[in-house]
Image: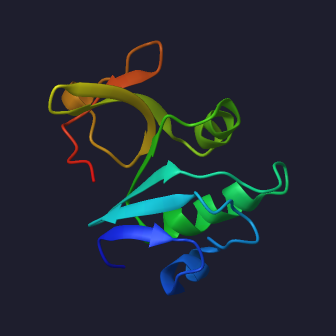
Amino acid sequence: MENGILKLDSKEGKKLGFTSNKFYPHSYLWIKGDTIFISFIASKKEGKGYFIRLLKKIEKVFSKIIVPTPTNRMTKILRKRGFVLTNLHNGDDCFKAMTKGLVVQNDEIQENGIGFLETVDLP
């Protein structure tokens, strides 16, 4: 898949199940190399499994997944799938995200579940 924004109903989006009948129009994904950012996504019908099915397909294609500022519901789903709450640094900015497949500095995850990761070049 090419780097850049992945929009609803695009050819690549359809392969992942990222379609307008399941997600609101403002939803999008961002690809950079082997990393995908689930930047802003909202399911039209919560509890129908749209997000989980999308996530399963994403996990088959991408080795690194970053979900900045997930909702509480998304956080519960992501934790069950092995994601960890992480502080990511982008220059002087720092934010929390659920991540999978990233390298944790010093091989540590603190007791509260927050890891401090390598600097990630954000889109």
Q: How is the image coloured?
A: rainbow
Q: Nearer the viewer, residue 27 or 119?
A: 27
Residue 24 is left or right of residue 114, and the answer is: right
Q: Residue furthest bottom?
A: 11
Q: For the view shown, which residue lies furthest in the front direction?
A: 25
- Residue that sits furthest to the left in the current view: 91
- Please determine whether, in this image, residue 22 is positioned above or below residue 122: below
Place of residue 103 in the rendered image (x, y in percent of width and height, measured from the top left): 27, 41
Is 43 on the left-hand or right-hand side of 12? right
Q: Residue at x 43, y 41 (%)?
A: 99
Quadrant in which residue 107 is drawn: top left
> In this orientation, which residue lies closer to the viewer: 24 or 32?
24
Q: Which percent across, then down, holds residue 88?
A: 30, 32
Residue in the picture at 58% in, 74% down: 16
User: For this rendering, which residue is in front, 19 or 66?
Assistant: 19
Is 77 located above or below residue 110 in the figure? Answer: below
* Residue at screen point 68% across, 56% down: 51
- Kindly indicate the quadrant of the structure image that contains residue 78: top right
Image quarter of the C terminus: bottom left
Figure quadrant of residue 102 = top left
Q: Residue furthest top?
A: 111
Number of labelled discs?
Answer: 0
Q: Position of residue 86 (x, y in %)?
A: 39, 29
Q: Residue at x 62, y 70 (%)?
A: 18
Picture coordinates of residue 41, whole percent (x, y): 59, 52
Position above or below: 86 against 63: above
Q: Is residue 67 left or right of residue 17?
A: left
Question: Of residues 84 and 68, which is closer to you in this image?
Answer: 68
Quarter occupied by the N terminus: bottom left
